[in-house]
Amino acid sequence: MYASVWKRFFAFLIDAVVFIVLFWVLSQMMNNASVSLVLLVIIWLYYALLESSPLQASLGKIIVGIKVVDKRGRRLTFWQATERIFSKLITNVTFYFGFFIAAFDKKKRTLHDRITHSAVISKHAEFDPDACEEEEEDSLTFITLSSVLLALVFVALIVLAIALPQYQKTERHVQLSRVLSALDYAARKQLKDSQNPWADPRVWISSYKKCQKISPEKLACDGFELILEPGGVKANVRAHTMDILYTLYYPFDGGPVVCNPLSKQGEELCATLNN
């Protein structure tokens, strides 16, 4: 009697095609902001009017042979159908886990079905209102909280799988820019200071902000080291694990900066620098 998850999914796809076509038509006639507003109103009226009509179904539901009823098997009023539409926002906020719970419910109810005390059944099903009384079940609050919790887990997985690596990649590029700037400044300053007759060009002559001298030839900075070498300055760039990702060599004779990768991330950054 109750519509399967797959039937509801295919009904949703059919309705989605209708909205895509409408969006395309509207986008030819007005700007994007107006299109979005008009489309939202159309979606509301589309579902509210059709699901509260004698058809009790949107176009997609009609095609797959299902309809919407209240908990007693009756047709929804316009305002009940409107409540059902807006309650879908709660389901959407849970990253559609509110839809997925229908797969584990014997009445195939989604979160918004539970909120509005409605159900989706086969078009020609014999609905017995007395058999549809609410059975003892988990509270709506528990179901909602469970859905939100699953959504948070889902978001956390997305962050770990996509956002975090992207953030780390961006951070490494920012670090590269910062190291190049510091390397250029320190090398030019060292070259200028070493022209003084009293200066020893084999050691760091000046001190630099956010860098600490740990030996005459080495400065420890935030995430990298600057080391004086014959003919130039080398930077050892480290990861948070303190492993060296790559080295940069800045020659005093004005030649190009040489990048030497010591890790996979270093290879990517050196390729970016060389390009």
Image (cartoon, rainbow, N blue to C red):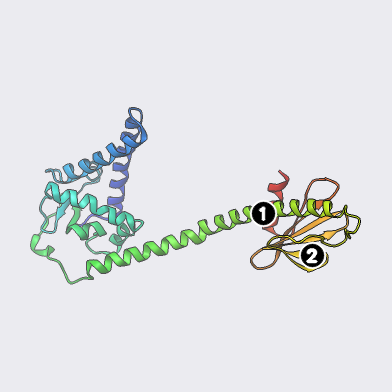
Within 10 Å of the Cα at label 1, are there few (<14), some (14-19), or many (20+) other Cα atoms? some
Residue 136 at x, y = what percent?
Answer: 18, 72
**Which secondary structure lies at badge 1?**
helix
Q: Nearer the viewer, residue 60 or 48?
A: 48
Residue 4 at x, y = what percent?
Answer: 26, 55
Labels 2 & 1 near each other (Cβ < 8 A):
no
**Which residue is under mark 1?**
178
Viewport quadrant of the C terminus: top right
Q: In the displayed structure, does residue 212 sit left or right of residue 145?
A: right
| Whether residue 122 can be seen here | no
Q: Residue at x 55, y 56 (%)?
A: 167
Residue 144 at x, y = what percent?
Answer: 28, 64
Q: Residue at x 81, y 55 (%)?
A: 190
What amino acid is found at the position of numbered circle 2 in the picture? Lys
Within 10 Å of the Cα at label 2, are there few (<14), some (14-19), or many (20+) other Cα atoms? many
Q: Nearer the viewer, residue 76 or 182?
A: 182
**Which residue is under mark 2?**
218
Q: Nearer the viewer, residue 95 or 137?
A: 95
Q: In the displayed structure, does residue 59 sit left or right of residue 238?
A: left
Q: Residue at x 13, y 63 (%)?
A: 132
Quarter location, residue 33: top left
| Whether residue 220 can be seen here | yes
Quarter location, residue 205: bottom right
Instruction: Of the two numbered discs 2 and 1 on the same chain, state the one appearing first in sequence.
Output: 1
Viewport quadrant of the N terminus: bottom left
Residue 74 at x, y = what percent?
Answer: 10, 53
In this picture, is 53 found above or below 115?
A: above
**Which secondary structure lies at badge 2?**
strand
